Image (cartoon, grey):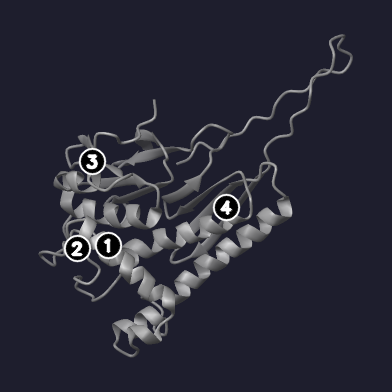
Amino acid sequence: MADTATTPRGEGRAGSSSPPRAEFPADPVLRHVHAVMGTMVSFDVRIGEGEPQRAHVGLARACARLDRADAVFSTWKPNSPMSLLRANAIRLGEAPPELAAVLELCAIARDLSGGWFDPWNLPGGLDPTGLVKGWAADRALDELRAAGVRAAMVSAGGDLASFGGPEPGSPWRIGVRDPWAADRIACVLESPGAVATSGCYERGNHVFDPRSGRAEARCQSATVTGPELWLADALATGLLVAGEAGLALVEAVAGYEACVISGSGSIAMTGSFPVAP
């Protein structure tokens, strides 16, 4: 959960004998929630000195990016290119180009995760869902950045892509929830750009161990931070399966850090996990 509060600067009181102080307008905030990919994607946009009209256009383009990702990659829509590829109804070269690009990223994530994340080795067949949501959020954030806004956060089902901060010079602060209580925070961190958490507390044990083919998680939740959400999302999925033993794999990836919460409630993290002071 992000600390999104803003406080306008004060103004001089009428009738005061002191000289009037300069007035600083509140940083305009644009918020929106978009239903897509089976979840709710929320936007928190700080317009800053940019043009509000451009921010709204950027938001519309961001939502269009998400809709496009859903149309291409949905495994629930029988006529999506992803579903057709899974059914061998089309070849990869006949699919939209972003499908091949995402599968290349999946191969990179598989290697970096030591095989704990492997969309080719799942009981239902090829399924890049564990990476696509983060990839789509990254693309949506690109549209907001291109619109010239000062800061923005995209929350895709709880996985966060961001730049800037709620106030100039202040990073977004993210709360990692306690796996056993939705109203409690296990720790607070400062986002370096992307924060992804995978856990068993809402959907049960829904992740598959690519090595055994069984639904198996070795911790209650896994959080990965880094510069891009597509990779943080994939690594968090793999880390939930690997448990604490997977922390060294994430730490070896430049710019990425992680923490896991075990079944006993203990927290283990990499050396530079960005816990807020």
Q: Which x, y percent locates residue 201?
A: 29, 50
Extreme residue toward the right, this view:
15
For marks 2 and 4, give the one nearer the viewer.
Answer: 4
Residue 143, numbered label: none
According to the picture, the residue beneath numbered tag 3 turns out to be 261
Q: Earlier in the sequence, mark 2 or mark 1?
A: 1
- Distance Cα–Cα, label 2 vs label 1: 19 Å
Q: Are marks 1 and 3 in contact (CB under 8 Å)?
A: no
- Distance Cα–Cα, label 4 vs label 3: 33 Å
- Distance Cα–Cα, label 1 vs label 4: 25 Å
Closer to the camera in the image, 177 or 60? 60
Report the amino acid beneath label 1: Ile
Query: 124 above or below 156?
Result: below
Q: Which x, y percent locates residue 255?
A: 33, 44
Q: Residues within 10 Å of mark 1 (few under 14, many from 20)?
A: some
Q: Residues within 10 Å of mark 2 (few under 14, many from 20)?
A: many
For marks 4 and 3, give the one nearer the viewer.
Answer: 4
Q: Residues within 10 Å of mark 3 (few under 14, many from 20)?
A: many
**Residue drawn where x is 18% and y is 44% of the image:** 248
Extreme residue toward the front, this view:
254
Secondary element at image label 4: helix
According to the picture, the residue beneath numbered tag 2 turns out to be 208
According to the picture, the residue beneath numbered tag 1 turns out to be 108
Q: Which x, y percent locates residue 37?
A: 44, 67
According to the picture, the residue beneath numbered tag 4 turns out to be 145
Closer to the camera in the image, 1 or 115? 115
Secondary element at image label 3: strand
Q: Earlier in the sequence, mark 2 or mark 4?
A: 4
